[in-house]
Amino acid sequence: MRPPPLRLLIPLLVALALAACQEGPSRPACPAGQVCLEFGNNTEPATLDPQQSNLIDEFQVIGDLNVGLTTDAPDGTPIPALAERWEVSADGLVWTFHLREARWSDGAPITADDFVFAYRRILAPQTASIYAYLVFLLKNGAQVNAGEAPPQALGARALNPRTLELTLDHPAPYLPEMLKHLSFFPVPRHVVEAKGEAWVRPGNYVSSGPYQLVSWRLGEYIEVTRNPYFWDADKVCVDTVRYYPTPDQVTAERRVAAGELDINTGFQSNRLSRIREAMPGYARTHISLATSYLSFNTRGVPAFRDPRVRKALSAAIDRDFITDKLLRAGQVPAYAFVPPGTANYVASGPQTSFAGQTLEARQALARDLLRQAGYGPEWPLEVEIKTGNTPDSTLMMQAIQADWQAVGVKVRLVQNEGQIAFAAYRMRDFQVGAMSWYADYNDPLTFLELLKSDTGAQNYGDYANPAYDALLAAANGEPDLEARARLLAEAEALMLSEDALVPLLFVVNKALVAPRVTGWVDNIANFHRARWLCVAGAEARAGAPDA
């Protein structure tokens, strides 16, 4: 992905500003008669452009500023947003969306043309969107992205200002779930064409959702206020939200306890017992549609092209120790990539070939595979793990370092701020990378599509297997959901047999939410839009949502 100039500046500016904000300012004053929410959000976003965003912490802000054809209900399920209703053709390929009368935050009408413009923009090669592959779902999307078809060939048409027609490459009954994702958000054509890449800056930014951007103080906070042009503005309780980067989760915990923050979207896993004792009612944990895993840089490290090496390193990891002894917040050891509970999937999915074996047996297998690949005491395998600098990731990588050293591998750890680490992953400037994938929509394809040969930058290990691609293509063409699930499971089994990645654990959502905050609903998708939140004592305001 080729980021706009703002993205290039942020890592350096954040590095300078971060130390100053670790302890954080005291809580800002909230104007009389208004409701303010101070929101800890883990990392500094690199962009607020829906079509160039990459990380979940960016989506937290972008998803409050904007909505798509559908959006997240309080429980994370899809509900109508800019589309009031829709119809689907008998073959499942043509979807016709009828837009509500809605306006951008500058008062301009939101039209079907804004959607068509957005989808052509995300697919344009010069946009270099990391999420362009999601829009391949539209007819000719892949061809437009590759420059093999003109933008006008894309399966997106404005039939009139308030009617949008989408023609799909294959049936997708999960489309309403997928349309919640920021890659399908409209963008304001009248602003983007006038301002170019600068449209995302405060003063230029125009949004479609319940909030509008006021300011962005790098390393301090992003401030948004209620959008008066939002069609449901009278039912939005919170007037102002400030999103703070909180990379130090222990400091963030203290700020929540002190009342400086109302919410923080994470906490250090192994502090859960202490938090529950010292701050009863604050800790919120819930099973997530997310998997933590490792990727091998097969492009840059020849050793990782050998499936024996990949299997050895995966088998040697003591996942039970990591989840039960180190993290201790309900995480589950993972021997598959698709998490349990994912919709439209088989009841019991495939697992790695060594699942169910004891740690001793797996370590013996790892040593044997490494010997077969030519590594041993005289010629040890040397690897570097690059990871973000969160406490949980640090604990996990230190444990994995010890596990790999136990089977004769020399391991070095490198920690970076999260945005810098993911920039390195995208550029393949790593040997082993540590990351988590949170479902973009509730379907196994959001996980399995990451490993398609044409996915691009987010296929960090550059896995490419024509048989795997063919199974996903067959699943896309299968209208029967049970038959489709079996094809997808066959694809996952193939990928796991080749150890294309290393599943580590199934993630637990973790948040600190002050008891005075109302409207927070724990959900598997882990989407909590500020539109639905309020603060105890403020619900009586006219039109505020019920707590």
Image: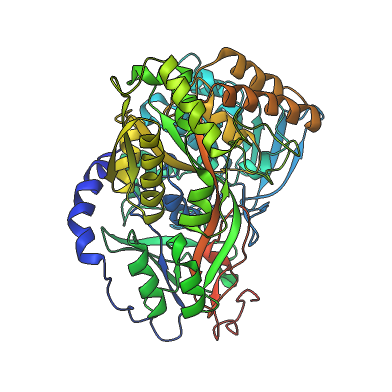
Q: Is residue 340 above or below residue 104?
A: above
Q: Examine the image and state in which quarter residue 179 appears.
A: top right
Residue reaching furthest to the left: 16
Side of 336 relative to 190 (left or right): right
- Quadrant of the image for the N terminus? top left
Relative image position of residue 388 (x, y in whole percent): 34, 46
Taking depth in this image into account, of 212 and 300 the one nearest to the observer is 300
Q: Residue at x 53, y 80 (%)?
A: 516
Visible residue check, residue 265:
no
Q: Is residue 160 visible?
A: yes
Q: Is residue 73 above or below residue 498?
A: below
- Residue 135 place in picture, x, y as percent: 55, 31
Number of marks in the rendered image: 0
Q: Residue at x 62, y 38 (%)?
A: 338
* Left or right side of 88 for 271: left
Residue drawn at point x = 52 percent, y = 65 percent: 530
Residue at image point 55% right, 32% down: 361
Q: Quadrant of the C terminus?
A: bottom right
Q: Quick check: 235 above or below 113?
A: below
List x then y, in percent, for residue 277.
Answer: 50, 78
Image quadrant of residue 428? top left
Q: Position of residue 110 (x, y in %)?
A: 54, 49
Q: Quadrant of residue 286?
A: bottom right
